[in-house]
Every structure is written in C-alpha cells, then in structure tokens.
Amino acid sequence: MKAIDIKLWRELWAMRMQALAIAMVIVGGVSIFIMSLSTLDSLFETRENYYRNHHFADVFASLKRAPLSLVKRIQEIPGVDKVETRVLAYVNLDVEDFKDPVSGHLLSLNANSAGLLNQIYLRKGRLLEAGRDNEVLLSEEFARAHDLQPGDKLAATINGRRKVLNVVGHVLSPEYIYQIAPGAMFPDYYRYGVLWMARKPLASAYDMDGAFNNVTLTLSKEGNEQDVIDRLDELLKPYGGIGAYARKDQLSNRFLTEELKQQKTIATIFPMIFLGVAAFLLNVVASRLISLQREQIAGLKAFGYSNFAVGLHYTKLILMITAIGVIAGIGFGIWMGKGMSNIYMTFYSLPFMIYVLKAEVIIAAVLISMGVAMVGTLYAVSSAARLPPAQAMRPEPPAMYHTTLIEKLGLQRFFSQPTRMIFRHIERRPLKSLMTILGISMACGTMMVGGFQEGAIKHMVEVQFGMSQRSDLTAIFTEPTSQRSLYSLQSLRGVEHVEGFRVVTAKLQFEHRSYRTSVQGIAPNGRLMRLLDTRLQVIDLPPNGIILTDYLAEILHIKVGDMLTIEVLEGNRPVVQVPVVGLAKEYLGLNGYMQLNSLNRLLNEGHVISAAWLKVDRLHQVNIYAELKGAPRIAGVVEQESAIKSFYETMDETILFFTYITTLLGGSIAFGVIYNSMRIALSERNRELASLRVLGFHRSEVAYILLGEMAVLTLIAIPLGIMIGYGLCAYLAFQFDSDLYRIPLVLGLKVYAFAALVVISSSVISVLMIWRNLAHLDMVAVLKTKE
Amino acid sequence: MSSDSQSRHQILEENVVFHVHEVTKVYQMGEVQVRALRGVDIDLHRGEFTVLLGASGSGKSTLLNILGGLDIPTEGHVFYGERDLTRATERELTEYRRFHVGFVFQFYNLIPSLTARENVAVVTEIAKSPMKPEDALKLVGLESRLDHFPAQLSGGEQQRVAIARAIAKNPDVLLCDEPTGALDSKTGIVVLQALQRVNQALGTTTVVITHNAGIAQMADRVIHLTDGLISKVYKNETRLRPDELNW
C-alpha cells in the first residue's frame, strides 16, 4: 500500500467518531429515501399483483333486477372478456353482545368457489359448501373486530326476515381492500362488514331466482372501457341499471388510490427534505474537515504531490465515509421499508406483500449522496490546494469581518462586544447561516405536517357532524316510502325528532362534463340536516333549483345561475334542467341538494322519502336500535356518534404513531443541524473562545457567544419554519383534495407550539452536549498553536 | 505548615507579587512523562520588568501559564499576594485572570470579528476599573487605527492591540509569552517599546518570556531557565532602550 493510502486509513481510524457522525447523517437521509420509495413501489406492485391474480373486475354495475338470460348479451358486447353476475344486498346485521346498529353488504357466491371475478382470498376456515344455505364467509376485519370465529353465529335481517348464519371462514377481497360503508367517511370495522353466502337462499329472499342485481366484468385486451360502459348502460337501462362504472371509480379502489397518492406525496417530500438537510450537513462537515488539514495539504504539495493527487486523496477519504453511510443507509432503509410494508399490508387488508426495491431507487440514493459529498469536498480541497505550500503552512490570516447592517443603523451602542461577535459571525457567512436557518425551518415544517392531519380531520368531523348533520341515527328504508312512515318512527319511545329525506342516484351534467352522484331532497329549515356556505353559515334552501357541493361545482365548471342537467338513474329516469341556486361547503363526498317537495315533483312521485334522520334520547338509544333492527322495512341503520368515537379511537393511534414519526424526523433534523453547526462553530472558533477564557471570561460568557449565534438562527428559523410548515400543509391539503373528501387547512395553535417546542428542545439538548465540550477548551494549547 | 507561614511572612516583608515555592510540573504525553518544571523557587516584585529566558522546552511557558492561572502545578505552591493559586477553584482562577492579569500572546489571539477598539472593549467591559479602550490604544500608538478589524492590521499592529487589550483593565501583572516571536525585528522593537512604556507609565509588574537573549538587556531582572530549573538570576545594572537592543 502506498504511504498516502496508509495515511488515509490511519486518519479515517483516528477520526472515526467524527466520521461516524457524518455517516449517521447520510444513514438518516438514505434510509428514509429508500424506505419511503420502496414501500410505495411495494404497495403499487402488491396491489397490481393482487388485482391480477384475483381477477379484479374492470367494470361494475348495479341494477334493480335482470334475468340471467341477459348475461349472454353482456358477453357479446365487443371488448368484454369474463362476466360474473351476483345478487348483492345491503342488510342489517345483529352481532351478539353488540348493541349498536351494524350493517353490511351480502354478496352471493357459489359453493366451493372463490368466485370467477373479484376472487376472495381465504384466510381462515373453509369456502361455502354446497347445499348449506345458512353458511357465511366474513370479511376478515369485521370478523376480527367482533371476534367471530368459524363455528360462531350471527343474524342478518334479509329482506325483512331474520336469518341466523353460521360463520365458516374469514376472507379478504380485492373489491374491499378499503372496507368502507357507502357514504361513510372512514372505515368502521365494528359497524360495517362484507359477507358472502350461497346464491340460492339470497336470491330467493330477494326474489332473484334466475336473476341478478349486480354484474362485474373484465375487458379483453382490445376492449375499450368507455365503449363497454356505454353499451352496458344501454343494455341495463330497462332493468333499472343505475350506471356502470370503471375500476378507477370503484369505491375501495378509489380510496386506496387516493391514499397511495397521499403516500406518494409524503414519500417524495420527506426524503427530499431529509436528504437535502443531510447534503447540507455533509457539505459543511466535509469542508471543515479539509480546512483543518490545510497544513497537511501544504506539506503534501511541498513534497511534490499534484493538486489532483491531493484532491483525489481527500475525495477518497470523504467517499469512504460516505460509502459507510450509504451502505448502512441502504440496509437500514430496506429493513424499515419491509417493516413499513408489513404495517401497510395489515392496514389495507392485503393478503400478501411483495417487497419491491427498484435498482433506480438505490442508484439515486448512491448518486445523490456521493455527488453531494464530492461537491463539498472538492470545493474545500481546491481552496486549500490553490494556496502556495509556504503560505498554507503559515497561520491563516485573521478572517475578514465587517460591521453589520444593524450596527450601521446606529444600534451598535446597544450591543456588548460578545453580541457584536454573534451578529458579525452570522453575517460573515450569509449562505451558511441561511442554510442553517433553512435546515432548522425544515425540521419545524416537518413537524407541523404531523399535527396538521389531526387538526384538519377533527375540523372536518366537527363541521360535517357537529354543524351540518346533527342527527343521531339515519334509518334507510328498503324502498321509497310514504312520508307517513315518519309517524311510526316518531312514535318510538325516546325519539325526539324525525326528518325524512329522499335520495336518488343521478348523473349531473354541465356542458361536456358530468358526475354521477346522489341528489338529496331535504326539508327546508330542517334541524337535523343543514347546508353550510363557504363561511360555514347556514344556507336557506330555496323552493326551486339545486344547491351543489362547492367542489362538485368546480369539477363541473358550473356557477350559481347556470342550468344543470339532471339525469335520474332510477324509476322512469327523467332528464330535467334545474338552475344552480347556491354552493355548500362539504368536506366529504359530492352531492346535490333540493327541497324534498321539488325533488318529489321532479321525479313525478307523491310525498315520498327513502330514509330518515332521527334525534333520540340517549337513555332510550339501545331500545330504539332493537326496534329498528327488527323493523322489516328498514334496510339499515347508521349511527353517527359511536362511529365517530370509534373512528377517533383508531385515529388517535394512527395520529400518535404519525406524530411520533414526524417528531422523530423533525427532531432529528433539528438536532442534526443544530448540533453539527455548533460542533463546527466550536472547532472553527476554538481559538477565539479559548482566548476569551484566558482573558477571564467565564464558561457561560463564552457559551453565550457560541450559543447566542445558534439561538438567533433558531429564533429566525421558527417563524420561517412555521411559514414553510403552513406551505407544506397547504400543498398536502391541495394534493389530497378529491371528490371523496377535501382536507381543510386548519392549523391550531397547538400545532405551531408543538413544532416550535420540539425545535427548541433539540437546541437545548445540543447546547447541553456542547456545554460539556466548552469545559475542555484547552487554553494553554491554543496560545501555542497557530490555528 | 511551617513553610507556608514562612512564605507569607516573606510576602509581607518584601514587596513581592508572586511567590513561587518548590513548583514542579509533570505532563503525561501519551506514554511518556515530561517533567517541565523540577522545583522552581522564585519571587517576583512589584513594578519589576522581568525577562524569563530559556531555550524551547526549558519550562518558561509552563511557569508563565501557572503564574497566569492557566495551569496548575503538580507539586508546590504559587502565591499571588496572599492567595494560593494552587488551591483556587476554576471559577476563582477565571476571576483572577479577569481582574488581575493581562496577557499578551505570541500569536496575538485577537477576536477577528471585533475591531481594534472592540477587542480592547471586550476586556474593559468585564473589568473593575479599566481605562478607556481609546486611551489604551493611544498608549501603544494605535489611536488612528481604532475601527480597523484584525484582518486590516499588520502583525505588529495586531500585537500592539493585544498589548492595549492586556493593559486596559489596569492589571496588576502583565504576562507576555514571546510577544515578538512572530514579528520582524523592526516591528518587534515597536512592540517592546509599547511594553516598556506601559511598565514605566503604569508601574505594572511585567513578565516577558523569550528565547531571544538580546531582549533580556531591557529588563530589571533576568531569570534563566534550563531543563525545568532556574539556572541563573541577575539584575541589569543599566537597562537598554528597546531601540538599542541587539537581536
């Protein structure tokens, strides 16, 4: 080995602690980068694989009732590959020892089969057996929530008749990865489940023998999705089809896609912040390392080594340190990525997880880290190598300082000498000071993202369920019924107030844009359902015209005063034009609202409602549930409060985990930037500070100069960080907006305070660690050495 | 105990600022023990201009650092007036340096971010009865360079700022470690003139370390150190002015 390479190894060993500190920064950046991107790739790959292997359908359609003979004609639509028909019902469930209303979807399934399309994945127990009419398979999450094992029983109200079902197995389905009740905001595994049972009993209960009310199909390679949907709609129209939709609009897939989109945004932003901060630190630390070797560089040059050879030598040194960080970072990133993927596997009810680590992710991590390290090193080496050796061996001339802008303004007389030192030092290296501020701000901003989600979701729930929808229960009738039904609900003991409403599925159209959703007919001046405008003030619903969710108006590019075309997808399917008379603020879903009477008129029907909101006395709640569960004309009951409560419980855990992660991330960024900056400042100003100690300054007075600078930078960084955090949250909220939900940009004081607190705590910890170093300033040595 | 009371007695009797008694200093340098001082006994007197002369490694810097409260002897005692510096806490040593000692170093050790005036002010702001920074700088002939930063000053000028900084607090003793070590002879003379002027004008007890025997001729008393021991002490009958010195 050449002598210069031996020097390399020895020095690497001698500075192992410092090298380790640099490597740790890289490990942080690289591992988060690898973890986020590989987790994301894994989720996408797993979903694709799951969909493919379990023949997840491409097109879905629901209808009232069609004979099985229609299947042949569906099959004949050009572009259709496989077709499967089903009987699907929305039912009330009764789980022993669980008082709250539980609803679920019941799907028909052939015996000993996982289905043709949307094949289920058996997790536990067995498939349905032929001839056993009361066997049922449960979605795993629902079964787990109620601890329903194979062999256990539960009851379902199937078309008004109570039937006891035997659980035979737990399954997962690509159709219900995200298992969410229609119209719900979040999954609630206690109050909503998906069940599969034999077709025969289900069909006979709903008068579907030799018929179906749901069809799914896959497309052949040359199949045109929109073309198939149009032809299928045409075919199903006479049978009460309410519009076919593509896989991208399928509820579970929609939610999953939105979540993955969010993950992608987060998985891009966080590693970029982390890697950016790591790059800056690496640069600073590497530059300092080289400048400490100034005399050695001069020595090497004096012996006849070329600038290139010297540059190569130090590049090797830095690259070796970087390599340690990159290799450990990749390993750690893979480990965390696998762990994270497994968490997601459970979270999203995926049967398996394919861990994907793309070569380009690793290459990007290596190139970014190495590139950044090289830039920092080469700059420092070239400035050291540019000096003639003799000059480099002499002590460095005093650094050039200037009086600062604040002092020129005449504020100088208010500052003691140590305070002047602080300001001048900050101003002497403006770029470095700025980068330090930016690094700390990023930490602050990162932390706000953690707190933002909690506040935003709480605000959503408060507005949606506190101000707008104020009922305790929603009872859904099996079919549209006379308003007289309200009297029987009202007469139930404990019911304080009842309001009926009408819901129809419709296609809303303006110019060439259209959106399929529901139109609700509600009572004007209702107490249980109030529309809010963008300033969250209650809107009066005019007798004519329609009010749209503001985001729906954006999608349709329609404004108040324009005429909206409504194509009703039920009954005799009227197509009418109504004026848009207002916009309502809603965070969840997209709807149109009309007065109940005017919707009834539009549908050419009498005073008909399809569901009712109830306000009930808490004391009688349990009795009311029991009454409603037994009522034959009520298909399902949705309870608001306990659903919100249970959501909060699950959210609290998730939020706690997320807050923990962002605090860890933000805290480590803050600590990394502050501690490293102070270590370097200490190294650079060692001589100056030791001199002051010699002149009779106490340790605390010397600390003031070093820590004061950091305090100033931190104090500038916090408001900046709050602005960055606000921007990040606004960006995320904007990115997360979809027709499923809109996340309001609501940031409580707590969010700001917490972010600032973590940054300040990180500084305090750094300060305590530096305080110890200040005790060991070598006053004697510093007087003897040049620099 | 008897040696302690004897020492105090001696201090009261004579006009002694420092009383150094059987001081040894042993450094652990890796696996090697270095005996920098091997039992030094010396008294320094008020107002005296003393030169500590010796080759490099003779222990002169170690002795100066101990006198200045920057280092603690392995054995023996150092009295500053009646105070035993070897028994002082870290905090007391800091206070001692702060109020009683002025330091001048070979490499100036100025604060690069402060101007000449401010480099002096940094000390006067924490002292008890300092002179004005401008007056201290005038004393070393730098009244026209008050607002220059160290980077804008020559080596000699930087060293004179360091002297102004050391004397501005009106210290009881001025300790100078190779003050001309990094300077050419012409500049060195200017710096020594400044030191002599301070010594004569303010009567500050001054100790200058050097390996340059020529400088010894301007001292009241010269102490030779060899291998950690005092080898010779003598008084100059006639003191030379700095510009008369032979380098």
Image (spheres, coloured by chain):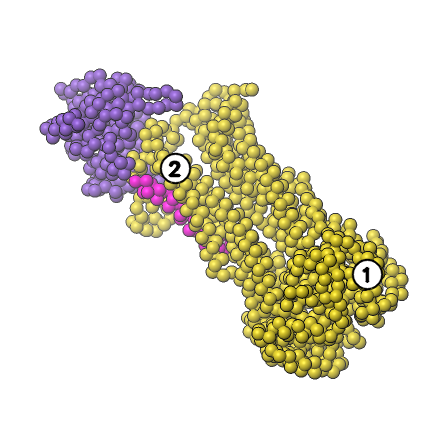
Chain that appears yellow: A
User: Which one is nearer the viewer's eye here, A27 or A230?
Assistant: A27
Q: Residue at x 51, y 60 (%)?
A: A747
Question: In the image, A71: left or right of A684?
Answer: right
Q: Residue at x 26, y 43 (%)?
A: B125
Q: Which badge, 2 or 1, is on the more N-terminal residue?
A: 1
User: Which one is nearer the viewer's eye here, A343 or A248?
Assistant: A343
Residue type (three-letter) at the residue carrying disc 2: Asn
Residue for badge 1: A132
Q: Secondary structure at mark 1?
A: loop
Q: Secondary structure at mark 2?
A: helix
Numbered disc total: 2
Can you give x and y, in whole percent of width and height, for residue A221 in the image? 83, 52
Can you give x and y, in whole percent of width and height, for residue A606 in the image? 74, 83
| 2 or 1: mark nearer the eye | 1
Q: Residues within 10 Å of mark 1 (few under 14, many from 20)?
A: some
Residue for badge 2: A773
Magenta includes A449? Answer: no
Dominant secondary structure (helix, strand or loop) of the stretch shown in magenta:
helix
Can you give x and y, in whole percent of width and height, for residue B62 in the image? 28, 25
Which colour is chain B painted? purple
Find the magenta span and give its range.
A698-725
State whether residue B61 appears in this view.
no
Q: Residue at x 72, y 62 (%)?
A: A153
Quadrant of the rendered structure where residue A561 is? bottom right
User: Which one is nearer the viewer's eye here, A56 or A699?
Assistant: A56
Mark 2 vs 1: CB contact within 8 A:
no
Using the image, name the chain to which the residue with label 1 belongs.
Answer: A
Can you give x and y, in whole percent of width and height, for residue B180 in the image? 28, 26
Q: Residue at x 38, y 30 (%)?
A: A787
Quadrant of the rendered structure where residue A129 is? bottom right
